[in-house]
Amino acid sequence: MSRLLPATPENVERAAALLREGGVVAFPTETVYGLGAAARQPAAVARVYELKGRPRGHPLIVHLPAASHLDAWAEEVPPAARELARRFWPGPLTLVLRREGGVPDAVTGGQDTVALRVPGHPVALALLAAFGDGVAAPSANRFGRISPTLAAHVAEEFDDPALVVLDGGPSDVGVESTILDLSDLERAGEARLLRPGGVSRAELEAVLGRRPLLPGEARAAAPRAPGGLKSHYAPTAPTRLVAADELLALAGALPGAAVLARRPAPAGFAGAWRALPADPAGYARGLYAALRELDAAAPRVILVEAPPAGEAWLAVRDRLARAAADERGDDGP
């Protein structure tokens, strides 16, 4: 099991030193826990891919100490990007921009763009400030598995005593960051929402003065980004989305089924049932921990009550659709 350490100032400094030495450190963000390495050290980044079992060529998100580091990583920073950074950083927004020439291919997947954010968690910010540069960090889980929102999830996931896990408590947002592609904003006038997350489409529109396009609405192909594969966040057990009015009947007809819903279990239900809050923020906060808890019981199938329509539930619907898909993928915080 990995080394689980409280996020004291001393341990944060120790973790920063490990990053400088080319080591890998798991740390909390407000979205999910990340598996971090010095972004300018390709050998360290390669160790992240190795630990996760993640295919090469998948870009990583580079976490920055502050927005003032943007120009060291992006050769083009449009005014809209600076305004979004001012409004939402630190926080759950990743910006995809044209990369600066010295950015290693190891973090961009060989593309001419780079994904950047400043996380909104005090431990992450302290670690980044102590390190002083960008840290590349996908979610701290095995490739294709459920993202971790607790340090204990990370420690259980990796049987590696060399891996330090800073325990900063539960992640507050609970799903990965919004990814907004601004790499063609100046050329084509397009801002593209590559992954929904903790910053809503409406909030982005209020700053941009235009509605960010969804992937199918853009004129040109978007760059590859974390969260773009069909299946992510997947339990080991088969997972099915079920309409609310069909949930009870199907759960009763499938012995060994586990249920994730927005309401308590009915009287007499003998299987595993996990109820999450009926508001989208509360649901997102508890989603991955609930899926992990249900999956740990090795159910025959996990039945998930389909979330409501509407943009407030967009990020939750995206994660659940990918959890229920067949092709395994991976993400970044």
Image (tube, grey):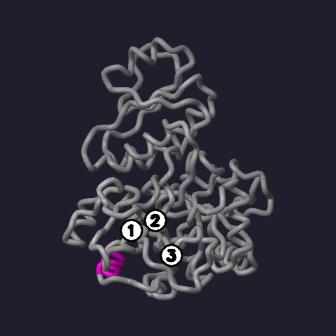
Instruction: Locate residue 194, reporting x and y percent.
Output: 40, 59
> Considering only order in the chain, which callout, 3 or 1, is on the residue closer to the N terminus?
3
49 relative to 252, above or below:
below
- In the rendered image, which residue does mark 1 sit on? 181
Left/right placement of residue 230 relative to residue 161 reads left
323 relative to 174, above or below:
above
Q: Amino acid at mark 2?
A: Pro
Asked whether the beta carbons under mark 2 and mark 1 sit within 8 Å of each other, the answer is yes
Q: Secondary structure at mark 1?
A: strand
Asked whether the beta carbons under mark 1 and mark 3 sit within 8 Å of each other, the answer is no
- In the rendered image, which residue does mark 3 sit on? 112
Q: Amino acid at mark 3?
A: Asp
Asked whether the beta carbons under mark 3 and mark 2 sit within 8 Å of each other, the answer is yes
For marks 2 and 1, give the one nearer the viewer.
Answer: 2
- In the rendered image, which residue does mark 2 sit on? 223
- Front residue of 152 and 241: 241
> Considering only order in the chain, which callout, 1 or 2, is on the residue closer to the N terminus?
1
Instruction: Locate residue 208, reporting x and y percent.
Output: 24, 72
- Front residue of 201 and 160: 201
- Mark 3 is surrounded, within 10 Å at the Cα level, by few (under 14), some (14 to 19) or many (20 or more) other residues, namely some
Q: Amino acid at mark 1?
A: Asp
239 relative to 69, above or below:
above
- Rounded to the nearest angstrom, the CA distance separating label 2 from label 1 is 8 Å
The structure residue drawn at horizontal position 68% and vertical position 61%, both measured from the top left corner, is 49
The structure residue drawn at horizontal position 37% and vertical position 47%, both measured from the top left corner, is 282
Left/right placement of residue 108 relative to residue 31 reads right
- Front residue of 301 and 123: 301
